[in-house]
Amino acid sequence: MMTSRWLKARQTKYAAYATTYILIVLAGIVVANILADRYSKSYDATSNKRYSLSDQTAKIVKGLTQNATITYFDQSTRFHEGKDLLDEYANLSPKVKVEYVDPDKNPQAAREAGIRDFGTAVVQIGLKKETAKSLTEEGITGAFIRDLKSSTRTVCFVTGSGEHQIDDSDREGLSRFKELLAKDNYQSKSISLLQNAEVPNDCITVVVAGPTRNYEQEEVDAIKKYVENGGRVMVMLDAPLKGGRSEIADNDALATVLQSWGVTPNKDLILDLNPLGQLVGTGPGVALVTSYESQPIVSDLKGTATGFPLSRSLDTKSTDKTSVQKLFDSSTSSLATTNLSSAEVNPNDPKNKKGPLTIAAAGTYNTGKESTQGRFVVVGSSAWVSNRFIGFNGNSDLGLNTINWLASDEDLISIRPKEREDRRITMTRAQLSWVRATSQFLLPGIVLIVGISVWWKRR
């Protein structure tokens, strides 16, 4: 009887309810921890995805067909410095395993790996090992790329007619582009088709980077023969400006070859009157692009802006030997003028062509040989890959994607790791004093006054 009354008592029911709720909460916490330990998921809310691996890294790691091991060499007390980044690689694919080695405790392993410095990572895929150049995503992913590629590939830049130079570190040089290519395991070198009118055998891609003088017929014939025998070429031709101290030649012989492939460079200059250019610090001489076609070179650039100084327009069509696809157009607020000898351009001139206007195109050449296909990309501007402009939004990604596609390295086409943004706030002494006064006195004072007011009313 007593037991029955105890079971029906209000306190007993409350205790049972509380115990049940506590057990449910504990069970939920246990299950959540088990799932969190087994499935590591996170959300990166930073503007440039600072704490997430890039699409390129994900594509490479998820596409692994062999097991990969990342070995991190450091002191045991400093393993945490590499753990967050390396665990992200392991979470991308079950084929990736991360190991931590303390060279002080295991000197033999460090000696065999050739480790000289703490904080070094080594990526091994199969029997091939590569040391990461830095403990960053660029460094680790670069080691993966070098492991996966059998050898270094050479990108050849034609020189001798006023082109941008790969060893030039000035504003118009291509030294930064050369450095970016090296991170994708490409070697860059200059070649002269004047001295030897034949593309060297070790060139997987040839780049014509904005010649200011006309190519000789022998040079043009060498490029034509190279592509039509299965070679790959990227041709960048600026608008043939005639005003000022430095004129740009028409390069009619080279333009005629491009036209035979289905890409006709027009003798005009694109001016972009989009007010967005003023916001990003460019003038009408830089054509801004924010919309792209579905071709592999540009399919991952959607939502990213690129800029093309002193660009000319292109006309495209496929031929019986080639298949041509445009990559992107200028904006609807752009126009093209054929007045190339004057600095003054009348936007209302009825002779102007209205945008959008094609700036770049890619094509393939049917050689008639099995498994041998020529490829070419034509861009109506060259300064977009120069040192002064390659850092503009998506320009570097576009340049690397173009080389990747030409070299048949489609697995590398993506958005590369971005440099970390400097988002520090610089304040004057007066602003700093105001922030200190607000946080230390004003806000606490408001809370105190509100609290006293509530207490006084309830009192």
Image (tube, grey):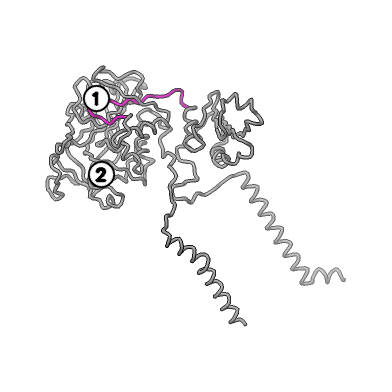
- Evaluate if marks 1 and 2 touch, with contact meaning CB atoms under 8 Å apart: no
What's under tag 1, amino acid-wise? Gly
The residue located at (56%, 73%) in the rendering is 448
Residue 165 figure quarter: top left
Q: Which residue is mark 2?
A: 286
The local secondary structure at tag 2 comes to strand
- Within 10 Å of the Cα at label 2, are there few (<14), some (14-19), or many (20+) other Cα atoms? many
- Residue 234 within the magenta-colored segment of the rendering: no
* Image quarter (top left, top right, bottom left or bottom right) of the C terminus: bottom right
The residue located at (71%, 58%) in the rendering is 23
Q: Which residue is nearer to you in this view: 300 or 425?
A: 425
Q: Position of residue 390 (x, y in %)?
A: 33, 39
Cα–Cα gap, marks 1 and 2: 26 Å
Residue 374 figure quarter: top left
The local secondary structure at tag 1 comes to loop
- Within 10 Å of the Cα at label 1, are there few (<14), some (14-19), or many (20+) other Cα atoms? some
Q: Position of residue 94 (x, y in %)?
A: 57, 36
Q: Position of residue 442 (x, y in %)?
A: 50, 69
Q: Which residue is nearer to you in this view: 424 or 193?
A: 424
Q: Which residue is mark 1?
A: 160
First-in-chain label (1 vs 2): 1
> With 282 as the anchor, is 85 left or right in this view?
right
Q: Position of residue 279 (x, y in %)?
A: 30, 52
Q: Is residue 109 visible?
A: yes
Magenta residues, as a range? 148-165
> With 424 as the anchor, is 5 left or right in this view?
right
What's under tag 2, amino acid-wise? Val
